[in-house]
Image (cartoon, rainbow, N blue to C red):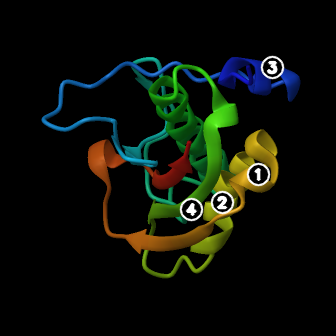
C-alpha cells in the first residue's frame, strides 16, 4: 500500500500531521468517486508556519514553501479519507491556490507552483491537475496561502 508517510519519506520530506480544527465544516468530503478537500493553510500540527502578505513581509520563496505545506495538508486529509492508500487516487482533478498578496504582486502563479510541484512529486502523473491561482486581499488568520483540491478516487 502506497501511504503518504511512505511517499514523503521517499523524497526526504516531513509528512504532515494536521489537527482537525473545531469548525462547522469537514476537512474533506467524499461524494461517490470524488473527494473535495477544504482549503488548507500552512500549518503543522497546531502551529501556523507562515503569516503575512506576499510581496510585503513574505517573499516569493517563502510563499512557495507555504503553498507546498498547504498541498501536503491536502494530501494528509486525502490519505485519511482513503484509509492510508494513495494508490486509490485516480487523479487530482482541480487545485485552487489563494494567495494573500499586495496588489502589485504579479507572481501569483509562481506561488501556486509550490503546491503543484508537490502533487506531481508525490503522485506522479496522477498529480497532474487543472489549476487556478488567485490573488486575495486577505486569508484566514493572516496566512499567505490557502490551497483546496478536487480529487478523483476509486
- Give the distance between the C-alpha atoms of the residues marked 1 and 3, in whole angstroms: 15 Å
Mark whose residue sits in front, 2 or 3: 3
The image quadrant where one finds the C terminus is: top right
Who comes first in sequence, dot 1 or dot 3?
Answer: 3
Q: Residue at x 45, y 73 (%)?
A: 134
Tell me the element at label 4: strand
The disc placed on residue 100 is none
Who comes first in sequence, dot 3 or dot 4?
Answer: 3
Q: Residue at x 27, y 25 (%)?
A: 21
Who comes first in sequence, dot 2 or dot 1?
Answer: 2
Snapshot quadrant of residue 79: top right
The disc placed on residue 93 is 4
Mark whose residue sits in front, 3 or 4: 4
- Give the distance between the C-alpha atoms of the residues marked 2 and 1, in whole angstroms: 20 Å
Determine which residue is flagged by label 3: 9
Please tell me which residue lies in front, 58 or 67: 67
Who comes first in sequence, dot 2 or dot 3?
Answer: 3
Indicate the position of residue 141 as horizontal and vertical percent values.
29, 42
- The correct choice, above or below, for 58 with respect to 14 in the image is below
Determine which residue is flagged by label 2: 60
Tell me the element at label 3: helix
Amino acid at each position: 500500500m502506497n501511504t503518504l508517510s511512505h511517499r514523503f519519506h521517499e523524497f526526504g520530506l516531513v509528512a504532515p500531521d494536521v489537527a482537525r480544527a473545531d469548525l462547522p465544516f469537514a476537512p474533506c468530503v467524499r461524494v461517490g468517486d470524488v473527494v473535495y478537500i477544504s482549503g488548507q493553510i500552512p500549518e503543522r500540527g497546531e502551529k501556523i508556519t507562515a503569516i503575512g502578505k506576499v510581496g510585503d513581509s513574505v517573499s516569493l520563496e517563502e510563499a512557495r514553501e507555504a503553498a507546498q505545506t498547504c498541498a501536503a495538508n491536502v494530501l494528509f486529509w486525502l490519505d485519511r479519507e482513503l484509509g492510508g492508500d494513495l494508490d486509490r487516487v485516480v487523479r487530482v482533478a482541480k487545485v485552487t491556490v489563494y494567495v494573500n498578496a499586495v496588489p502589485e504582486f504579479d507572481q501569483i502563479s509562481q506561488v501556486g507552483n509550490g503546491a503543484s510541484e508537490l502533487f506531481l512529486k508525490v503522485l506522479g502523473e496522477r498529480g497532474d491537475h487543472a489549476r487556478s491561482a488567485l490573488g486575495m486581499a486577505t486569508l484566514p488568520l493572516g496566512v499567505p496561502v490557502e490551497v483546496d483540491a478536487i480529487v478523483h478516487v476509486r
